[in-house]
């Protein structure tokens, strides 16, 4: 289990050892990094402009053996600015490269900044060979290269300044109670709320809350970039397969794009229709109840996509082929179909096959756990997965009280890249034109920072 927390006095030797294990750092850089630790421990800030630390550990504190420090991040408010932050330091153990540790640290930082009202994040790094991985990482997590100062550190070692804008956290929409469970899923357990409490979210709303950390506007922009880079027609109408709460479609509707959403759960479709209507996007989205291997009742589109690894619900190559044929039949010539899939390495011990995260909604905490049970995978790359989401409330400092929960069990088929190519070759109407490793058209699947497998297929 991977956990995160703030800095404690006993962490200093752990951070020192971690810095020593990273060959890209010089002795001077390690000394500066530890100086920030010492300042924070010796003189805690009271004005909000001090250094803030996020540490990532393997193993829960209090368990068997000492938790292992996997990585840490240091950031803080930039003095004399209204809402700018500096990312001062990020380091991860070489044993956990490409395991999602650094990405998780950055996500936590961005979440905290969003809760404070959002702002601009700035990070500086060098261009020399030892920092090459850092440069690729900031490109992969959608920081923008804002400036380069040639020969800043030394001849041939440039200063590279990256920035990223973090939007303020959106106020949550009060979830509806009494939703019917999605088809094939267990009903949510819930207690009657105390008078004055926010009602606990039922299953579709709880699923929506658990994935509230996603940057749907940025992912929409990535999908549009895929259409521009790899497609052959302007995007005027889109289709989201396995659309769930339809947050991606709401982001498209903000731009005036015509939207269609398909999902196999009637309860989820009903929830998405109500939620989109409440936020003013309902008139722009047409919904159809259909599984990934069923044809939805929608008109042809310029762009279609399958988000959130939902494609792996199709548990055989034949089912994947059926889906691709249906997608091709609903794409106009030159249109693209984008699939966000799990990285094939996540079926190995070194991959990211367990993740945990928390979303806060007022006094309610949404705790989610996802696991790929790689110990039970088959040679054909079929593997069980589980998703557990629990909504709890804590009032007046008391113990947390569970309000509602869901547990979903499924069997996934997770092809490697060769497997995807074999399936795509059996659908002549589509061409596999790109395999990407992140929500960035400039990050190929072979990139060192790749953490997803995103396939882009073009309708001939």
Image (cartoon, rainbow, N blue to C red):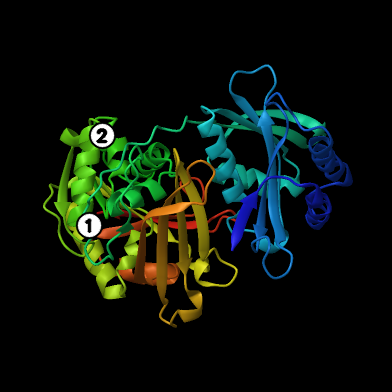
Identify whether 60 is placed above or below 33: below
Locate the C terminus by quadrant.
Answer: bottom left
Residue 421 x/y as whole percent? 38, 67
Are the residues tagged 1 and 2 within 8 Å (C-beta)?
no
Assign a secondary structure to mark 1: helix
Q: In this rendering, does residue 76 appear at all?
A: yes
Residue at horizontal 46%, vertical 80%? 376
Residue lying at 78% horizontally and 31% vertically, measured from the top left? 151
Tell me which label, 1 or 2, sits earlier in the chain.
2
Q: What element carries label 2?
A: helix
Left or right of 299, for residue 137: right
Seen from the viewer's position, the closer of residues 393 and 337 is 393
In the rendered view, does 248 fall on the left or right side of 100?
Answer: left
- The picture places residue 6, in percent across and down from the top left corner, at 68, 45
How packed mark 1 is, by other alpha carbons closer than 10 Å (few <14, some 14-19, many 20 or more), is many
**In which image quadrant can residue 83 be found?**
top right
Q: Kindly identify which numbered label has been placed on residue 286.
A: none
17 in relation to 143, above or below: below
Residue 193 vs residue 422, the one in the foreground: 193
Instruction: Answer few, some or many: residues within 10 Å of disc 2's Cα (few below 14, many 20 plus, some between 14 and 19).
Output: many
In the rendered structure, the answer to whether residue 197 lies left or right of residue 416 reads left
Q: Quadrant of the N terminus?
A: bottom right
Q: Which of marks 1 and 2 is in front?
A: 2
Q: Name the residue under label 1.
A: 327
Residue drawn at 36 percent across, 69 percent down: 409
Q: In which quarter of the image is residue 123?
A: top right
**Spot occupied by residue 259 in the image (x, y as percentages of width and height):** 21, 40
Q: Name the residue under label 2.
A: 253
Q: Quadrant of residue 144 in the image?
A: top right
Q: Distance between the residues labelled 1 and 2?
A: 21 Å
Residue 5: x, y in percent? 65, 49
């Amino acid at each position: 289990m991977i956990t995160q927390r703030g800095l404690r006095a006993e962490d200093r030797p752990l951070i020192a050892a971690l810095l020593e294990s990273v060959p890209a750092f010089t002795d001077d850089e390690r000394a500066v990094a530890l100086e920030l630790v010492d300042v924070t421990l010796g003189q805690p800030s009271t004005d909000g402009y001090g250094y803030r630390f996020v540490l990532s550990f393997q193993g829960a504190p209090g368990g068997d053996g000492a938790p292992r420090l996997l990585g840490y991040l240091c950031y803080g408010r930039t003095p004399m600015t209204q809402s700018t932050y500096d990312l001062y330091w990020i380091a991860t153990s070489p044993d956990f490269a490409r395991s999602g540790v650094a990405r998780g640290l950055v996500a936590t930082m961005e979440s905290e900044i969003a809760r404070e009202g959002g702002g601009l994040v700035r990070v500086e790094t060098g261009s020399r060979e030892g920092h090459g991985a850092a440069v690729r990482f900031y490109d992969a997590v959608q920081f923008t290269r804002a400036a380069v100062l040639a020969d800043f550190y030394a001849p041939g070692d440039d200063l590279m300044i990256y920035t990223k804008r973090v939007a303020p956290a959106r106020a949550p929409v009060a979830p509806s109670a009494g939703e019917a469970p999605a088809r094939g899923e267990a009903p949510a357990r819930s207690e009657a709320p105390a008078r004055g409490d926010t009602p606990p979210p039922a299953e579709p709303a709880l699923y929506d809350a658990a994935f509230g950390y996603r940057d749907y506007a940025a992912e929409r922009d990535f999908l549009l970039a895929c259409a521009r880079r790899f497609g052959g027609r302007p995007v005027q109408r889109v289709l989201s397969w396995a659309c769930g709460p339809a947050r991606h479609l709401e982001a498209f509707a903000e731009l005036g794009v015509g939207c269609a959403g398909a999902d196999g759960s009637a309860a989820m479709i009903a929830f998405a229709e109500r939620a989109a209507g409440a936020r003013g996007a309902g008139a722009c989205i047409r919904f159809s109840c259909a599984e990934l291997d069923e044809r939805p009742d929608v008109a042809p589109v310029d762009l279609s996509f399958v988000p959130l690894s939902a494609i792996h619900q199709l548990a055989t190559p034949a089912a994947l082929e059926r889906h691709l044929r249906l997608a091709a039949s609903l794409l106009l010539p030159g249109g693209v179909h984008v699939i966000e899939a799990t990285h094939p390495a996540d079926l190995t011990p070194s991959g990211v096959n367990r993740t945990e995260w928390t979303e806060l909604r007022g006094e309610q905490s949404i705790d989610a756990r996802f696991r790929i049970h790689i110990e039970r995978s088959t040679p054909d790359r079929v593997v069980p997965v589980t998703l557990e989401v629990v909504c709890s409330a804590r009032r007046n400092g008391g113990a947390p009280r569970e309000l509602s929960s869901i547990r979903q069990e499924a069997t996934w088929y997770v092809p490697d890249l060769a497997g995807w190519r074999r399936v795509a070759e059996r659908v002549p109407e589509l061409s596999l034109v790109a395999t990407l490793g992140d929500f960035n058209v400039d990050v190929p699947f072979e990139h060192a920072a790749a953490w997803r497998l995103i396939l882009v297929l073009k309708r001939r």
